[in-house]
């Protein structure tokens, strides 16, 4: 086992903006009407507490929003927001606000029939931009009436999803998207100038040109723009096998190159320099059928990204919080390679704990590198996370950390998520990979999805606390060092207790 030693200093500071819990993704909004979806989001909110949630399909036909009828020979429009209300009411009751993605196109408003996904979201421009603008303004007026203006102006609005991909926007027509953005952003601002609007929600295909041209268009035409959005994924070309896809991970630097490139482009425009950039989708693989999402490797890889993304991005939304998700259809098994932090059956995946651990960090960091991040409280207590992603083979590491602290007694807590002690995918495979686990099997899988917890008491006499973090392949570890003042009840002698 390779040992890496690090001397930490409580007086040091390093850049760290922990925006991990700002936003999380979901499948299409219609899924919010399902009980299992609610249960998964409720657990996520209890343990992590995301501020915003973003998903597709707000205006799709399965939300039953847009309708037309003929009266006295004249076509008229009407809107039904009942399903959106049900979804948003539930979100807000769980302490999470919508990050509005305006799309896709209602069938009766669309200029074509091209769709995407199992649930057939229409991805063509509107046949009449006036009708689209009226839908947008009607929706905002309804939300202001239902939830209050002060609430709605806190919701970010984004126009469409990945228009630079032909599957998401007919022909990946850049100029047509700019028209859509122009019309939509002005419609949004017509309801309240304080509502924040952004785009272009692009992914990694021709993204450099799209970003530059989008900013040039907004600047030239004085189009409203409050923040920039893009997506980022961490895998290379896919290799399909049945319903599943297998991909190599991009090197860490390869993933980070995309947000860094976009940041540089934005800042090259004096008018937009420093403007917020939100990654409104990110994960390792962009496929809902890649088993990597269910693995400890995924958790460790994502952990390092979360330590750095805040340096350039206002937020970075993990895609997605749960496995009630149907882009490619309904999954056949609880571990199907879907995006979620929670597998169906209420089974937390290893990456779930990545987010739980980041929630518990202090705001100020004293050390950060490719293996760990360490934060401190005002009282000098430490909380940190370490990771060891290993895509191939085995590579165990030991981190030997020492830090200058006051003399006294300290409590060391370590929570470990690795292939040995917190690997529900492995447990599921060992039990024969049942497509429909029994209640007892589900209980076992949930039990096996918990981190291993170890504790230690450290006595510091020379102003230096030292401890080790052992990282097996694809391990993720949370640790904290807290100064304590021991309390002992009268007559309680630990040296007289067997087994301590």
Image (spheres, rainbow, N blue to C red):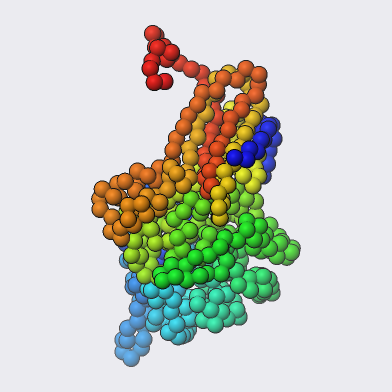
Image quadrant in which you'd find residue 462: top right
Quadrant of the rendering where the C terminus is positioned? top left
Q: Is residue 480 left or right of residue 14?
A: left
Nearer-the-camera pick, 194 or 428 = 428
Seen at 48% across and 50% down, the residue is 296
Question: From the viewer's perspective, is residue 114 above or below residue 422?
Answer: below
Q: Furthest residue to the top?
A: 491
Nearer-the-camera pick, 143 or 436 = 436
Seen at 65% across and 38% down, the residue is 4
Image quadrant in which you'd find residue 334: bottom left
> Residue 216 in the image: x percent, y percent?
69, 73
Nearer-the-camera pick, 106 or 290 = 290
Question: From the viewer's perspective, is residue 323 above or below residue 407?
Answer: below
> Residue 483 in the image: x percent, y percent?
55, 24
Image quadrant in which you'd find residue 232: bottom right
Seen at 36% across and 88% down, the residue is 74
Q: Is residue 226 left or right of residue 63?
A: right
Question: From the viewer's perspective, is residue 292 above or below residue 462?
Answer: below
Seen at 53% across and 65% down, the residue is 247
């Amino acid at each position: 086992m390779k040992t890496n030693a690090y001397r930490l200093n409580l007086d040091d500071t390093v850049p760290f903006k922990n925006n991990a819990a700002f936003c999380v993704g979901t499948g299409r909004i219609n899924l919010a009407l399902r009980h299992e979806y609610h249960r998964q989001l409720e657990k996520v909110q209890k343990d992590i507490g995301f501020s915003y949630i973003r998903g597709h399909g707000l205006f799709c036909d399965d939300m039953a929003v847009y309708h037309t009828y003929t009266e006295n020979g004249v076509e008229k429009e009407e809107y039904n927001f009942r399903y959106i209300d049900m979804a948003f009411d539930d979100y807000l009751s769980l302490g999470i606000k919508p990050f509005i993605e305006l799309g896709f196109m209602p069938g009766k408003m669309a200029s074509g029939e091209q769709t995407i996904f199992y649930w057939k979201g229409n991805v063509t421009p509107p046949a009449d931009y006036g009708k689209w603008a009226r839908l947008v303004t009607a929706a905002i007026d309804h939300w202001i009436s239902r939830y209050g203006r002060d609430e709605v102006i806190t919701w970010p609005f984004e126009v469409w999803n990945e228009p630079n991909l032909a599957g998401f926007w007919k022909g990946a027509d850049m100029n047509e998207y700019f028209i859509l953005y122009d019309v939509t952003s002005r419609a949004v601002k017509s309801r309240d100038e304080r509502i924040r609007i952004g785009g272009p929600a692009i992914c990694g295909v021709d993204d450099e040109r799209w970003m530059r041209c989008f900013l040039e268009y907004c600047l030239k035409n004085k189009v409203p723009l409050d923040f920039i959005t893009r997506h980022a994924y961490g895998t290379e070309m896919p290799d399909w096998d049945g319903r599943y896809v297998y991909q190599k991970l991009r090197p860490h630097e390869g993933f980070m190159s995309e947000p860094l490139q976009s940041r540089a482009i934005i800042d090259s425009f004096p008018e937009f320099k420093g403007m917020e950039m939100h990654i409104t989708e990110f994960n390792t693989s962009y496929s809902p059928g890649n088993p990597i999402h269910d693995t400890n490797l995924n958790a460790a890889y994502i952990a390092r990204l979360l330590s750095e993304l805040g340096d350039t991005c206002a937020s970075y939304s993990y895609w997605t919080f749960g496995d009630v998700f149907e882009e490619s259809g309904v999954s056949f098994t609880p571990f199907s390679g879907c995006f979620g932090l929670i597998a169906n059956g209420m089974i937390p995946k290893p990456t779930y704990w990545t987010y739980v651990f980041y929630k518990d960090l202090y705001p100020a960091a004293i050390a950060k590198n490719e293996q760990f991040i360490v934060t401190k409280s005002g009282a000098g207590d430490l909380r940190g996370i370490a990771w060891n992603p290993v895509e191939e083979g085995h590579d165990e590491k030991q981190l030997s950390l020492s830090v200058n602290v006051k003399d006294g007694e300290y409590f060391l807590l370590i929570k470990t998520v690795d292939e040995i002690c917190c690997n529900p995918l492995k447990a599921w495979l060992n039990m024969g990979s049942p497509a429909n686990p029994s209640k007892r099997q589900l209980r076992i899988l949930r039990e096996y999805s918990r981190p291993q917890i170890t504790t230690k008491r450290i006595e510091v006499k020379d102003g230096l606390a030292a401890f080790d973090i052992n990282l097996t392949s694809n391990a993720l570890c949370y640790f904290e060092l807290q100064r304590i003042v021991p309390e002992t009840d009268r007559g309680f002698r630990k040296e007289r207790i067997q087994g301590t």
